[in-house]
Image (cartoon, helix red, strand yellow):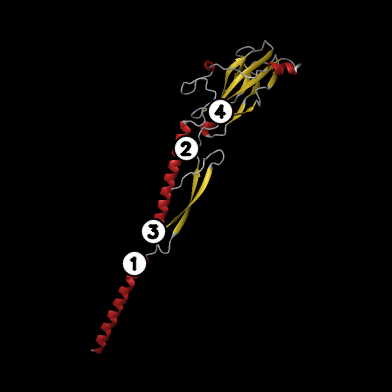
């Protein structure tokens, strides 16, 4: 039985090739070799990575006369997992300063658009949650800062206005599938991942054991029938001697 000796990570290597040799106990010994391809299943062990904005301290200039419906900026993130574990959804979970409800975000693309005309100048900050659809659900957060003004005349002032951190109440976070709120750091090594990894290793061991047994049976069937031939040769010699003796007796008569 083959067992896993090290931790496997699909993101590092998702496919393995294993060569298995089966040898019988005959004389001479016969053997055969087969190759098994092992594909690792994905578990949701990577939260989304936000690529843009690159920092919570970055900002973008928005003109006050921007028309409603205009695309302002976007939040872009990627996930190293596959399948539903890599499907990303975007949502605004907190807004600070400015006019509430001024901006919307597309849950599928992350595009941020202006919802209504801006009447106040200043800094608008949006706290965006980026989550995947895995089980358990993992997510990241990023701060989008929008400075509404005609120009950027005082860079130092804007930097001083940028929030260093944002306190999010548990009531502001949408509940997950189990009804829990405000969980900022999901457990990446929970019981679900451990159970799935154990089942994967067990199934892999059973599969390799069955494969080795089948290969051994195939090799046994290919073994030459040497013993049967050895038992037939003396019988043929005895029959030949008896026939020769009978012919000699007939000739003597």
Above or below — where is 174 with respect to 221? above
Say few, some or many: other residues with alpha carbon within 10 Å of mark 2 (under 14 / 14 to 19 / 20 or more). Answer: some
Q: Is residue 87 left or right of residue 52?
A: left
Q: Of 218 and 47, which appears nearest the observer?
A: 47
Mark 3 and mark 1: span between their CA atoms? Answer: 15 Å
Residue found farthest to the right: 153
Mark 3 / mark 1, whichever is N-terminal: 3
Mark 1 and mark 4: span between their CA atoms? Answer: 68 Å
- The residue identified by callout 1 is 228
What number is the disc on residue 88?
4
- The residue identified by callout 2 is 197
Q: Of 75 and 50, which appears nearest the observer?
A: 50
Mark 3 and mark 4: span between their CA atoms? Answer: 54 Å
Identify the residue at horizontal 53%, vertical 43% (top origin).
15
- The residue identified by callout 3 is 221
How many numbered marks are there?
A: 4
Q: Position of residue 212 (x, y in %)?
A: 43, 51
Of marks 4 and 2, the one in the foreground? 2
**Marks 3,4: beta carbons within 8 A:** no
Residue found farthest to the front: 5
Determine if residue 62 is in view. no
């Amino acid at each position: 039985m083959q067992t896993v000796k090290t931790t496997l990570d699909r993101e590092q290597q998702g496919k393995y090739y294993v060569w298995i040799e089966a040898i019988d106990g005959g004389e001479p010994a016969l053997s055969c070799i087969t190759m098994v391809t092992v594909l690792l299943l994905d578990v949701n062990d990577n939260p989304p990575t936000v690529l843009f904005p690159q920092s919570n301290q970055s900002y973008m200039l928005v003109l006050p006369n921007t028309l409603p419906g205009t695309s302002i900026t976007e939040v872009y993130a990627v996930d190293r997992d596959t399948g539903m574990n890599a499907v990303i959804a975007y949502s605004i979970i907190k807004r600070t300063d400015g006019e509430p409800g001024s901006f919307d975000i597309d849950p599928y693309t992350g595009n941020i658009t202006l919802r209504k005309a801006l009447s106040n100048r200043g800094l608008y900050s949006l706290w965006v949650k980026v989550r995947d659809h895995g089980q358990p659900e993992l997510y990241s957060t990023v701060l989008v800062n929008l400075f509404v003004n005609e120009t950027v005349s005082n860079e130092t002032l804007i930097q001083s206005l940028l929030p260093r951190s944002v306190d999010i109440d548990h009531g502001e976070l949408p509940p997950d599938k189990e009804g829990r709120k405000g969980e900022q750091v999901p457990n990446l090594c929970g019981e679900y991942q451990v159970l799935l990894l154990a089942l994967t290793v067990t199934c892999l061991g059973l599969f390799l054991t069955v494969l080795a047994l089948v290969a051994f049976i195939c090799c046994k069937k290919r073994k030459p029938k040497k013993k049967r031939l050895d038992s037939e040769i003396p019988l043929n010699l005895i029959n030949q001697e008896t026939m020769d003796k009978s012919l000699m007796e007939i000739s003597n008569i």
